[in-house]
Image (tube, grey):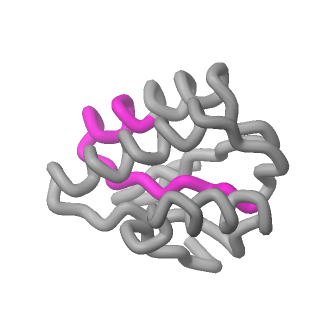
Amino acid sequence: MQTATRTILDAGNRLDAVQAFRLRDEADTAWTADQSVIVDVRSVEYMDMAGLSALAWIMVSCRRRDEAATLLGPLPPSVARLLDLTSFDRFFQVRTSP
């Protein structure tokens, strides 16, 4: 979904290698169009290391663009747990509305 200045990327229900590649591609497309990105993780039931890597890549890319790395939540318990274990939760803003 696109709004005036940002694109909301839907992570789907499985954030695995296939979805990670798609998320990175969609983020690149948004940034090319001068849009900021928000990753919607509300429906994620499963996330593996490829998914975590995609979120890390988006986080680093946001920082390089001087933007906040933002997730649309509330975070599912499995996502919250993985972000907490890796301390990535400190680097993302979590919003409950776009």
Residue placed most toward the observer, 86 or 9:
86
Tell me which residue sits at (34%, 59%) in the image.
Answer: 5
Quadrant of the frame with the C terminus:
bottom right
Q: Residue 30 falls in which quadrant of the image?
A: top left
Tell me which residue sits at (67%, 56%) in the image.
Answer: 41
Along the horizontal axis of the image, is 58 left or right of 8? left
Tag count: 0
Outermost residue, front direction? 85
Asked if residue 96 is positioned above or below residue 12 in the image, the reply reads below
Q: Residue 6 falls in which quadrant of the image?
A: bottom left
Asked if residue 91 is positioned above or below residue 79 in the image, the reply reads below
Q: Residue 72 falls in which quadrant of the image?
A: bottom right
| Magenta span contains residue 36 | yes
Residue placed most toward the observer, 32 or 16:
16
Asked if residue 4 is positioned above or below residue 25 in the image, the reply reads below
Residue 4 image point, x, y percent:
39, 59
Residue 71 image point, x, y percent:
53, 64
Tell me which residue sits at (68%, 30%) in the image.
Answer: 16
Residue 42 image point, x, y percent:
74, 61
Along the horizontal axis of the image, is 17 left or right of 53? right
Tell me which residue sits at (17%, 52%) in the image.
Answer: 65
| Magenta span of residues | 27-42
| Magenta span contains residue 8 | no
Along the horizontal axis of the image, is 63 left or right of 70? left
Along the horizontal axis of the image, is 95 left or right of 68? right
